[in-house]
Structure formats: C-alpha cells, structure tokens
Amino acid sequence: MIQPGRLSASTFVGTIEPGARGLILRDDDGMCWRLGFVDEAVAVGLSGRVRVRGRIVEVDRIEAEYVDVRDGA
C-alpha cells in the first residue's frame, strides 16, 4: 500500500549552516531551508555537506527523515 506522506519525500543535497532558529540547509543553487528533526539529537554537531531525505512542510522548512553526511561532520 502506498502511503501519501511518503510520496512527497524528496532528497536535497547541500551544506548545513547554523542559523538563529536552528540548522539551515543551503543547496548549490542558493536555496535555503530550515531543518526540523523528529529526534533533535540527530542535529547535534551536524555540519558540512549532507544529503537530506525529507518533506517540505513550509516554504522555508524541511522535515528531515534521514541525513547522510558527505564530509565535514
């Protein structure tokens, strides 16, 4: 059975940056999203190039399901 929530998940590649309201993912085209995590412990010490699988839940926010660190963390 296909779950509708899984259909909207996408993969984003970019660089993690600290922001005033949490971590920010900036892709190679300059687009930026705030990252939200179900388990906030995942975000501790996260930096550098990453691949994020998640859903865009607001214009400027991604709800991350999975983060694959490419380098720098």
Image (cartoon, helix red, strand yellow):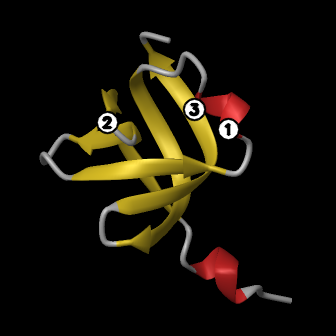
Q: Position of residue 8 (x, y in %)?
A: 54, 77
Q: Of callouts 2 and 1, which one flags the residue occurring earlier in the amino acid sequence?
A: 2
Q: Position of residue 44 (x, y in %)?
A: 60, 22
Residue 10 position (above or below residue 35): below
SS under mark 3: strand
SS under mark 2: loop
Q: Residue furthest front?
A: 20
Between label 2 and label 1, give the one nearer the viewer: 2
The answer for how far apart the CA atoms under marks 3 and 1 are is 15 Å
Residue indicated by mark 1:
40
Q: Position of residue 22 (x, y in %)?
A: 43, 38
Q: Residue furthest right?
A: 1
Give the residue type at disc 2.
Ala
Between label 3 and label 1, give the one nearer the viewer: 1
Q: Of callouts 3 and 1, which one flags the residue occurring earlier in the amino acid sequence?
A: 1
How many badges with numbers are in the image?
3
Residue indicated by mark 3:
68
66 left or right of 29? right
Between label 3 and label 2, give the one nearer the viewer: 2
The answer for how far apart the CA atoms under marks 3 and 2 are is 23 Å
Residue indicated by mark 2:
20
The answer for how far apart the CA atoms under marks 2 and 1 are is 16 Å
Give the residue type at disc 3.
Asp
Residue 62 position (above or below residue 68): below
19 left or right of 3? left
Give the residue type at disc 1.
Glu
Q: Residue at x 13, y 46 (%)?
A: 30
Q: Of callouts 3 and 2, which one flags the residue occurring earlier in the amino acid sequence?
A: 2
